[in-house]
Image (tube, grey):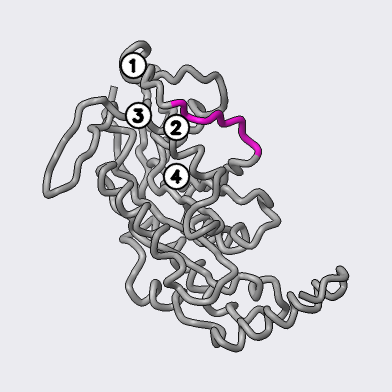
Amino acid sequence: MPGPRREKGLVLFAFNRNPEEEETDWEVTRVREKRKYVLAFNSSPRREKGLTALVLERFMAGAASAGAETETVYLAEKKIADCLGCIQCWFKTPGTCRHKDDVPELHAKMSRADVLVYATPLYICSMNAIMKRFLDRIMPLAEPYQHYEDGVCSHPRRNESQGGQRTVLVSTCGFPGLRNFDPLVLTFQRMAEVGGSELHASILFPSSALLARDPCPAAEQLEYVFRAGKEAVGDGISEETKAGYSRPYVDPKEYVEEMNALFRALRERAGDSG
């Protein structure tokens, strides 16, 4: 049987039914090279209707336009039990959690992803509870042993296929200014570091109430998010693109004054003049 031939990104396998037949009679099966798989976990309780989803959708659309397979998992729709810290997944049933829920299915998806995207609204300076509950459940993916290097302690991965992906953080918050995201970004940077990967990019949109306006004052920044999705499945998101989606689109003081006027009106409407 002839070996595989490569032609324009395809692997061609030729199977000859009869050694005496001409090559033109061979059955040819084309097997496409593996497409990049971009997996996003969105923890917004508003799911696809939230402002976090609005930003995430532009990134995923960009990745899809570059030929990637994309999937968004809405964690609010999944059954995810709280980690009990019982460490049964390390000793009694290594690699398997005691809970019977949707998490093993999500871990399986993670293991084949080329790019992992974590999308969460900012709640009290960090990720929301839905995302935290999910991330607490990654313990079965690690071994109990400890590794210490350069002041950082970590657990080795149980399976080398479960880590090392390019990681992207997407988040929105109601306050103006990128500094509000600092604790969240630091958390994901450390998680990526101890997991053997990197936090490739943080796509952060403050003053998120403005994203729902028409026209959207952040329309240009969202186009850079689309570009980021395209680049993430290639050579990586460029510094130019990161600077593009990070540009301010509102004056912080004006935004605060506008929001406070809105909140006063809402309280007065509710009968509270405080």
Q: Residue at x 51, y 53 (%)?
A: 119
Q: Earlier in the sequence, mark 1 or mark 3?
A: 1
**Quick one: 260 or 237, which is closer to the camera?**
260
- Give the structural element (helix, strand or loop) at label 3: helix
Q: Earlier in the sequence, mark 1 or mark 4?
A: 4
Q: CA distance from mark 1 to mark 2?
A: 14 Å
Given the image, on which type of amino acid does mark 3 rest? Leu
Residue 132 placement, left or right of 268: left
CB atoms of marks 2 and 4 within 8 Å: no
Compared to 192, does 134 lie above or below? above
- Give the structural element (helix, strand or loop) at label 4: strand
In percent of width and height, residue 247 lies at 46, 80
Mark 4 = which residue? 37
Compared to 260, does 199 lie above or below? above
Q: CA distance from mark 4 to mark 3?
A: 20 Å
Mark 1 = which residue? 94
Q: Check residue 141 in the rendering and tell me which mark sits there, or answer none.
A: 3
In percent of width and height, residue 108 lies at 45, 29
Q: Earlier in the sequence, mark 1 or mark 2?
A: 1
In magenta, the rendered stretch is: 77-84
Given the image, on which type of amino acid does mark 2 rest? Arg
Q: Earlier in the sequence, mark 4 or mark 3?
A: 4
Mark 2 = which residue? 137
Q: Is 110 covered by the magenta stretch?
A: no
Given the image, on which type of amino acid does mark 4 rest? Tyr
